[in-house]
Image: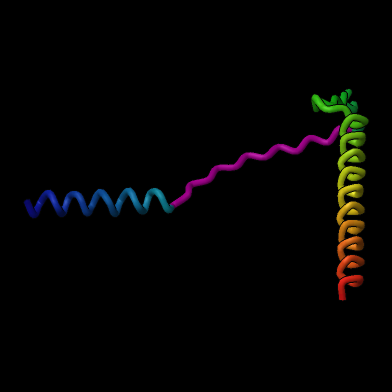
């Protein structure tokens, strides 16, 4: 039993050392070319929403919120006028 525990500890230590050694091998070749060909690039908008539709929706939302805010202000003014008359 003691022998198995010693073998287990030995293996754990060896594997831990091997793991933390981080052996790294790097090979780097640099090649300079005088003339480079530029790759052809196509930019494609994959968005299913058109920008014009998005802007229109945002403008409609701003108008809706503005009307609601104006309505709340008008209601507040009417209520404050009624209270002013009562007092």
Q: Main secondary structure of the magenta part?
A: loop
Q: Position of residue 55 (x, y in %)?
A: 91, 36
User: Is residue 24 shown in magenta?
Assistant: yes
User: Is residue 48 shown in magenta?
Assistant: no
Quarter of the image for residue 42 reads top right
- Tell me which residue sits at (20%, 50%) in the image: 8
Q: In which quarter of the image is the C terminus?
A: bottom right
Q: Position of residue 16 (x, y in %)?
A: 35, 52
Does 30 appear above or below 49?
A: below
Q: Position of residue 76 (x, y in %)?
A: 87, 61
Q: Where is residue 46 in the image (x, y as percent from the top left)?
A: 80, 25
- Tell me which residue sits at (90%, 72%) in the image: 84
Q: How many marks?
A: 0
- Tell me which residue sits at (88%, 43%) in the image: 64
User: Can residue 30 be seen in the rendering of this structure?
Assistant: yes
Q: Nearer the viewer, residue 32 or 1?
A: 1
User: Can residue 36 be seen in the rendering of this structure?
Assistant: no
Does 18 appear above or below 36?
A: below
- Tell me which residue sits at (91%, 47%) in the image: 67
Furthest-bottom residue in this view: 87
Does 5 appear above or below 50?
A: below
Magenta extent = 21-33
Quarter of the image for residue 51 reads top right
């Amino acid at each position: 039993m003691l022998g198995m525990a010693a073998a287990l500890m030995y293996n754990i230590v060896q594997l831990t050392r091997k793991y933390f050694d981080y052996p790294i091998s790097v090979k780097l070749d640099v090649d300079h070319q005088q003339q480079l060909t530029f790759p052809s690039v196509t930019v494609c908008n994959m968005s299913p929403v058109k920008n014009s539709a998005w802007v229109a929706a945002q403008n409609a939302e701003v108008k809706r919120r503005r009307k609601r805010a104006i309505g709340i202000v008008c209601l507040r003014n009417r209520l404050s006028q009624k209270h002013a008359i009562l007092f």
